[in-house]
Image (cartoon, helix red, strand yellow):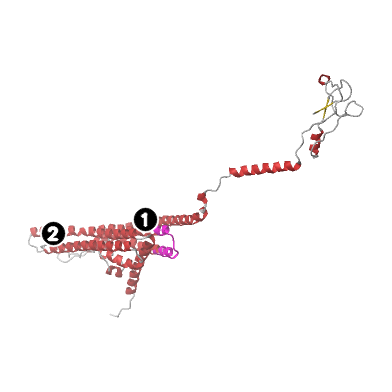
Amino acid sequence: MALVATAGDERRVRPVRDLGSRRRRRGHGHGDLRAAAPPGGGRRVGGPFRPDADALPLPAVVPTVTLATPAPPLDVVEAEEVKFGKRLLQAQQDDVPPPSSDSVGHDDDARPRDKIQRRLAQNREAARKSRLRKKAYIQNLETSRMKLAQLEQELTMARRQQHGAYGVGGGGVAPAEPAPAPVDPRVAAFELEYAHWVEEQTRQATELRAALQSHAPDVQLRVLVDAGLAHYGALFQAKARAARSDAFFVLSGVWRAPAERFFLWIGGFRPSELLKVLAPQLDPLLELQAAEVRKLQNTAKQLEDALSQGMNKLQQTLVETLMTVDVSPDGAAAAGYAAQQMASAVGELADLVDFVDKADHLRQQTLRNMHKILTPRQAARGLLALADYGQRLRALSSLWAARPREPA
């Protein structure tokens, strides 16, 4: 606000509007300096008077001067706005955290991991379905075993009635021929279980071959190898149950193909011979691996010889026991002694179950130790070679059975 002085004594001082601010609002740049005194004295139109209490007496005429703060030019204002906008943008950018160095290449590394996780999920789902199929299969086996036991009981009763119906003249009864030994339901169940085991091994071999041909990662191969080893463990457990029911059935190998029985050793394959079959399929082996394989083969051979010597000793003991049995009817004492000797021979035959268990334990330990020596890819090739070897033996048996025969 500027002070305006007019001519004459004791004139009033009145406020004058700042024209510079009005011009700045209109975009005129700097405010001007001008004389505000109207010609001839008197009031200035448009400006309010101060009250009488605020009037200041001036002794002389003073020219009216309007002082106003010069407004900044328009380009300066725009420059300030640009600077303010830049500072605001910089502040917003500072709020965003910088990318972490750990995230560099994260997408590239995450892709193979995601692929492995998907394959592991697929393997878990396949294992779950396999367990469900196995559970349903075991339930069917239990049902079949109960039906088989019932049929066996009915057949035994029919044979007894048939033998009781025969008689001879003179009131005598003809001695009946001994009835054939009944089939143990657990043995019949083992035959069915082994057939299912062969089918499952064929399926696993197909998965192993596909994984090896597609160059699957070691994680996937390790899962397939573990499943194959567990499959062999299930076979050894089933054989142990069948051996407790009928050891001769397991030792004879009638549940295997004829060509497989040709290489049979205490109800299964020889571990040392198995290593000979696998060795060409595992090349190239490192020097340390080759040394460990040779050491494992020598250990298996020594344990095989020990079990074979035990079997020979058991056979010799049975021969000696049977040769000392007195079967001549020379009194009740001789008959009692013979029964005692036969009971002793039967007790010695119970050791056959232990031999079957020890032989299967040696086979399982050989497979596990071989797995520890080899890499996942080598172990996968080894299990595939073992499955193919068994398949070739069964195919050879089929060809042998279908061979042309000379007429009798």
Residue shown at 66%/44% (left/top)?
A: 86
Viewer-nearest residue: 286 or 64: 64
Does residue 174 belong to the magenta stretch?
no
Quadrant position of residue 260:
bottom left
- Judged left or right of residue 73, residue 322 is left
Badge number at residue 341? 2
Q: Which residues are magenta?
A: 205-223
Pointer 1 with pointer 2, Cβ within 8 A: no
Tag 1: amino acid = Gln
Q: How would you rate the neighbour count of disc 1 (Cα within 10 Å): few for under 14, some for 14-19, many for 20 or more?
A: few
Quadrant position of residue 150:
bottom left
Badge number at residue 184? none
Residue shown at 30%/65% (left/top)?
A: 275
- Total labels: the figure holds 2
For the question of whether residue 210 can be seen, the reply is: yes
Viewer-nearest residue: 102 or 210: 102
Q: Quadrant of the N terminus?
A: top right
Badge number at residue 139? 1
- Where disc 2 sits, the SS reads helix
Does residue 208 belong to the magenta stretch?
yes
Tag 2: amino acid = Gln
Q: Residue furthest top?
A: 53
Distance from disc 1 to disc 2, alpha carbons, whole Å, reads 42 Å
- Judged left or right of residue 74, residue 90 is left
Q: Residue furthest left?
A: 330
Residue shown at 68%/43% (left/top)?
A: 83
Sequence-wise, which precedes: disc 1 or disc 2?
Answer: 1
For the question of whether residue 232 can be seen, the reply is: no
Q: Residue furthest bottom?
A: 407
Quadrant position of residue 129:
bottom left
- Judged left or right of residue 83, residue 337 is left
